[in-house]
Image (tube, rainbow, N blue to C red):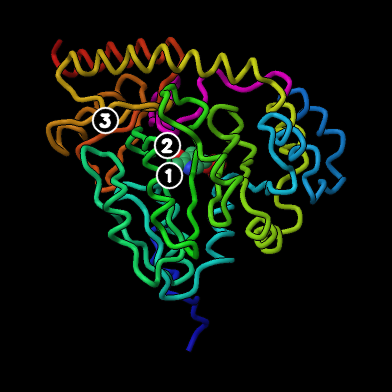
Amino acid sequence: MRPEPINNILDIVPYKGGEATIEGVDKVYKLSSNENPLGFSNAAAEAFKDASGELNIYPDGAHEELKNAIAKRYGIDENRIVCTNGSDEVFQLLGRAFLNPGDEIIQSEYGFLVYRLIAQQAGAICVSAKTKDYQTQIDAILAAITPKTKIIFIDNPSNPTGTYVSFDEIKRLHSAIPSNILFVLDAAYAEYVNANDYASGIELAGEFENVLMTRTFSKIHGLAALRIGWTYGPQRIIDALQRVRSPFNVSLPALKAGTAAMNDGDFTQNSAAHNQKWLGELSQIINEIGLKAIPSVTNFIMVEFKDAKHADDCDIFLKTKGLIVRKIGAYNLPNCLRISIGTDDANRRLIAALKEFMGK
Ligand SMILES: *Cc1c(COP(=O)(O)O)cnc(C)c1O
C-alpha cells in the first residue's frame, strides 16, 4: 500500500508553456507565448520596484486597490470582482467550488488546455464540442449539454485558433442553456479585438446569475511574470471563489504593478495599435506565400500547413533563424503552428524566414 492521489490525478498530462530557448542560439525571438512585445507599462515597473521596499509585509488579502482600479476602468462593482494568481488560478478555483467526480464541463474542440486539466483534477469529464473552420460552434455546444453539465467554458477569442464568436451568438448560447449551468467567458484577449460584433461578456456577467467573465494581466498589460488575473460576475459565485482561494493569492508586487497597469491606458492603447498593424500585415503575407493564416482577432496567428511534417519542418527551420513559435500538437493541431505577434524586428525576421522556407 502507498498513498494514492484522488481522481487519477497522475494520469493528467502536465501543461507545458511555450519554449523559450534554442540550444546554441544567443538571441532568440520568442513568439510562442502570446506575450506583449512592447514589454509593460513604465508605471507598473516603477510600482514593482517600490514594492521591493516592503518585502516583509503581507499583501492586502482583499486586493482593495487593484479591484478599485479595475472597477473604475470598467465601470463595474468592485465587490463582484475576484483577483487571482493569473487567470489560471480562477479556473482551478472553479473546479474546486463547482465540480464533483462524474460532472461534465463543455468546451470547444480546441478550447484552452487548462479547462481540461481542472476537470481531470476534480474527476470530472471534459466534453469537447466540434468546431467548423476552427470556429466555436454554438449549436455543437448546445448539443453536448446533459444533466451532468456543470460548466461551459468559452475562450473568446479562442487560443490557439485566434477566432471569435460574435456577441449575438454568445447571447444565443446563454439564453438556451439551463440556468443551473455556469457559463464562463474567458476573455484573455478581449483588448486586442477589433470587431464590431464582439463583446467580452462583461454585460452578461453583470446581469445574470450564471455568467462569469475572466480577464488577465498577462497579455495586453504585459505582466505575465507577475501572475495576475481577475474575474467578474454574480455576487454569489464571486463569494464562493473568495472562500476557496488562498488568503494571500496575489503577491504585493503583483497588486501594486497591476494597479498601475490598469491605470495606464496609453500603454494598452499603444499595444493594441502595434498588434493591429502587424496582425493584418503578417496574415496577408502568410497567405500570399502559400500558407494559411486562420483569421485572427488576437495577438497571435494560427498558421495551417500542408500536414504535420510540413509544420514540424517549418518549426525547425524557424529555430535556425532564432525564432521560437508554438507547436500545438497538444491541441490536436499538429499541422498548425501558433505564432505570436512580436516586435517590429521579430516580425520582419519572421516574414523573411517564412518566405525563405516557402521558397518565395
Ligand atoms: C493566456 C491565456 C490566459 C491567461 O492566463 P494567465 O494565467 O492569466 O496568465 C487565459 N486564457 C487563455 C485562453 C489564454 O490564452
Please identify the quarter of the rendering in which residue 269 is found: top right
Q: Mark 2: which secondary structure?
A: helix
User: Which stretch did the figure color magenta?
Assistant: 21-43
Q: Which residue was labeled with disc 2? A: 167
What amino acid type should be assigned to the residue bearing mark 2?
Answer: Phe
Q: At which x and y percent is residue 284?
A: 26, 14
Whether residue 165 is situated above or below residue 83 in the rendered picture: above
Residue at the image position 38 percent from the left and 30 percent from the top: 22
Q: Is residue 233 left or right of residue 137?
A: right
Q: Is residue 299 left or right of residue 206?
A: left
Q: At which x and y percent is residue 142?
A: 32, 56
Q: CA distance from mark 1 to mark 2?
A: 6 Å
Q: Which residue was labeled with disc 1? A: 171
What amino acid type should be assigned to the residue bearing mark 3?
Answer: Asp
Q: What secondary structure characterizes most of the magenta part?
A: loop
The answer to the question of whether label 1 and label 2 lie on touching residues, with beta carbons closer than 8 A, is yes
Q: At which x and y percent is residue 333?
A: 24, 43
